[in-house]
Structures are given as C-alpha cells and as structure tokens.
Amino acid sequence: MDKAGDLLKAGDIEGLAVLEEEGKVLQEKGETLKGNLSETDKATLEEYLKGKAMKMLSASGLDKLGENMEESLTKE
C-alpha cells in the first residue's frame, strides 16, 4: 500500500497497473488469512487497512476531491 501511495504521488500510471496485478494476488492471500483470525485480530487488521487506504487517498488527492468540487461550484 505504501508503494501505491508513492506511485500515486509520482503519477506513475504504468507502475500502478503493474501493482494492481500484484495487489490482486495479495488480496486473495489476505482473504484466506482473514478466515483464520480471531474477531479481535480481524478488527485490528481492518483498522490498519483503513489507515493505509486513507494514506493512499491522501497521496492521490482524492481525499480533497469533495472540497475542491464544492469550492469550484461556489465560484461559479
């Protein structure tokens, strides 16, 4: 996920496409692992992944998309 954030910051679309394929494999492995976790560990993992996802959104600028759209619309 950190690598994806770095690629987003750099605007490396080709790198993101390659990473997407790697991500699919990791996601499948993660789903298998998740089935063997306790409820507490599942919750901990969910929180960790949410934090990583927010970091990626921030790197891409998507976390500010709503604010930017609202600001743009109020200017018009």
Image (cartoon, rainbow, N blue to C red):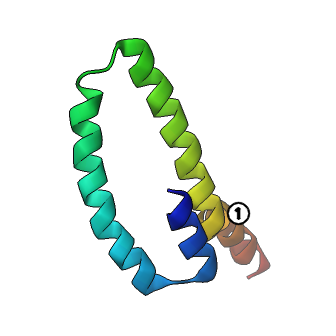
Residue depicted at x 51% and y 84%: 12
| Number of numbered discs | 1
Quarter of the image holding residue 8?
bottom right
Q: Position of residue 1 (x, y in %)?
A: 49, 56
**In the image shown, does 37 or 47 lie closer to the viewer?**
37
Q: Amino acid at mark 1?
A: Glu
Quarter of the image holding residue 45?
top left
Q: Secondary structure at mark 1?
A: helix
Q: Position of residue 16 (x, y in %)?
A: 42, 75
Q: Which residue is mark 1?
A: 67
Q: Which residue is most to the right? A: 75
Residue depicted at x 34% and y 76%: 18
Up the image or down, 49 lies above or below 14; here it is above
Describe residue 22's horizontal placement relative to residue 10 as left or right: left
Q: Position of residue 69 (x, y in %)?
A: 65, 71
Quarter of the image holding residue 66?
bottom right
Describe residue 44's horizontal placement relative to residue 64 as left or right: left
Up the image or down, 37 lies above or below 60; here it is above
| Quadrant holding the C terminus | bottom right
Mark 1 nearby-residue class (10 Å; few <14, some 14–19, many ≥20): few
Residue depicted at x 53% and y 36%: 48
Describe residue 58's horizontal placement relative to residue 3 as left or right: right
Describe residue 74's horizontal placement relative to residue 52 as left or right: right
Q: Position of residue 26 (x, y in %)?
A: 30, 52
